[in-house]
Image: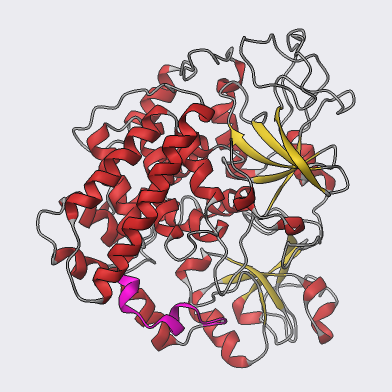
Amino acid sequence: MATKVFTTDLKIGMFVADLDRPWVDTPFLLQGFLVEDEEQVRALMEHCEYVMVDRARSTGDEYQPTATSAPGGAGTTRVVTQMMPGKVSQEAQPGTPGAVPPPPARDSLADSVTPTSGPPPARPPKLAPSRSGAPIVPPPRYGSEESLAYPGLLGRVLSGIKGLWHKEPEFVAPEQPKETPHEFEARAALAPPGVVITTYADQVTVEEEVPRAREVVAKSADLLEKLVHDIRLGQSFEIERVQEIVDDMVDSIVRNPDALMWVARLREQDIATYGHGLQVSVYLTAFGRHLGFPKNLLSVLAQIGLLLDVGKMRLPKPLLEKQGRLSGEEFEEVKAHVQHSLDILGETPNFDPEVILGIGQHHERMNGSGYPKALVGEEISVVGRMAGIVDCFAALTNHRPYAAAVSSYEALRSITGWGGEFFHEPLVQQFVSSVGVFPVGSMIELNTGEVAIVVAHNKVRRLKPRVLVVTGPDKTRLPHPSMLDLLYDPKMGGEQGIFIKRGLASGAYGLDLADYYLS
């Protein structure tokens, strides 16, 4: 539980667990901090209207909850006790920095994804082996659906994609489930003017695409390293080389987006220096594929993701790695990275104007609170809005020098909470649909106690992905991780089968995602 406190009522000793806006839009670089002086209070008043205070982690007199009282009363603090918007609390556990107490049962992740009784659906051919290695016997068909209890915008997003869970899967020749005319119209309405959208179908399985995806990630990492080197020396970079890598990335995502998302996420620690741009590029291109954009526009999105932060190479490294709040001057200097990026790209001839546009707008926000131009609503291009959503998601889910990563599920909850005011709400809904409630590469805990990593989504039921089980119920690392399809292998989970209990942040229980690759 957290308490909503207006910034005019903040006091020293309160622990700020969340803001009323994206963290990446503020000089507060930690995902939660203790208010220690009046300067921090003034800074919060400057950037936020209210914050969420975790009184269990507050100190002194602020440790005990304050009774709610009428606004404006002498000596009173206006508070409203509620769950943090866009957040899912986690139990304290090894490898989960800043974990907070779990929420009430009605809002728990376990309740949200717990299926009702009923046998699983009919099995298609050629499934991955069960973790026991024994032949899989087709179970009978489901008689009922999972009951969902997601609140707010995320609930509406899930309701909008629930129809995807009723179709029969196609594993031999993977196909995207048929969408309703309303779903198609919703995607078409988000396309830039004059763009005719399509519907992509997976051409290969994740396992088949992973080797090519690894090659794309390796080449992209090498390219980014060379770009950084050239920029620091004041040299222009080779646009032809960028286009070559982008073409390979687009082709891989068109064949099967899960493979590249899997490899990029698992290599995040290995390529930490340049991993943010690579992950933004992968997620942004997969987002465009979901919307049905043609390949030339997917190429634009891939370039935006790779290059949106190249301007940071012109900022002092100590500034980028500073732990704690930035001063007003430092925050303005960091915000200048957008213009630095545009200047660098402006020195390179023949760059696509749409790429320049998206990079220049990825920090703009729908309510005009963004930068560098404080654009409002329709003034922000579609690619700029998309880039802003994905950039924020990647920032929240990656470890940084000044902040621990949150789980992908938490990040999606946060972004949906900011939808409408800061991000374009229809695009937020489509982004959740494109990456799944638990995106590929997410670390999760099953109701059996085992920890697993999401490998691929089941198009029929988004809450029943294929996962790689990496620990036993006691969180002990398994010497031989095993594949488990939650849709077709519900053994050992009791009457309700095996289901996802909650999302975990990268590094939970001391597990390193980079240790796990599909063979």
Q: Is residue 171 magenta?
A: no
Q: x%, y% of residue 60?
A: 83, 86
In the picture provided, is 414 more to the left or to the right than 67? left
Task: Find residue 106 and report its image quarter.
Answer: top right
Task: Find residue 37 and report its image quarter.
Answer: bottom right
Part of the protein shown in magenta: 311-325
Q: Is residue 488 above or below residue 17?
A: above
Could you say which is closer to the camera, residue 337 or residue 380? Answer: 337
Q: Look at 60% across and 81% down and name the residue there.
A: 8
Q: Is residue 36 above or below residue 129?
A: below
Q: Look at 37% across and 66% down and name the residue there.
A: 370
* Farthest left residue in view: 349
Task: Find residue 445 and report its image quarter.
Answer: top right
Could you say which is closer to the camera, residue 512 or residue 402? Answer: 512
Q: Is residue 316 magenta?
A: yes
Q: Is residue 443 above or below residue 77?
A: above
The quarter of the rendered structure image containing the C terminus is top right
Q: Is residue 506 visible?
A: yes
The quarter of the rendered structure image containing the N terminus is bottom right
Q: In this view, does 202 lie above or below 248?
A: above
